[in-house]
Amino acid sequence: MGKMFAPTFFALVYIALMAVYIRFVLILPIPVFYRVIGALVLSSFIVTMGYLLMRRHKEIQEEDSDDLSKY
């Protein structure tokens, strides 16, 4: 369980930061089209981070030792 703390923590921090950026983009005084495009791009980063986090958790569960111990 300890091995899953760091990836989860950093993923949640990243997702929270992207959410703040989305909020910032949506209040900018620019045309709505650009606000929507910016919010969609940042949202895609959140989805990607969620996918990578799920893959990392699966990888940790399948493997007995951590990746760093191989090097």
Image: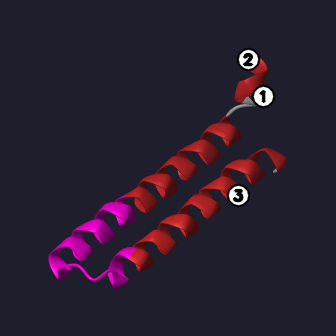
Q: Which residues are magenta?
A: 25-44
Q: 50 or 38: nearer the eye?
A: 38
The amino acid pointed to by label 1 is Ser
Q: Quadrant of the C terminus?
A: top right
Q: Which mark is residue 65?
A: 1
For the point 37% across and 66% down, the residue is 43
Magenta highlight: main SS? helix
Whether pointer 1 and pointer 2 mark residues with C-beta atoms closer than 8 Å, the reply is yes
For the point 49% across and 54% down, the residue is 49
For the point 37% across and 63% down, the residue is 42
Q: 48 or 62: nearer the eye?
A: 48
Q: Determine whether, in the image, residue 5 is placed left or right of residue 26.
A: right
In this picture, is 30 found above or below 49? below
Name the N-terminal-most of marks 1 and 3: 3
- The residue indicated by pointer 2 is 70
Q: 59 or 34: nearer the eye?
A: 34
Q: CA distance from mark 3 to mark 2?
A: 23 Å
The amino acid pointed to by label 3 is Phe
Q: Position of residue 36 (x, y in %)?
A: 24, 75
On the image, which quarter does residue 64 sit in? top right
For the point 32% across and 71% down, the residue is 39
Q: CA distance from mark 1 to mark 3?
A: 20 Å
Marks 1, 3: nearer the viewer = 3
In this picture, is 62 found above or below 16? above
Q: Position of residue 17 (x, y in %)?
A: 55, 66
The amino acid pointed to by label 2 is Lys
Judge whether residue 42 is colored magenta: yes
Q: Determine whether, in the image, residue 36 is placed left or right of residue 14.
A: left
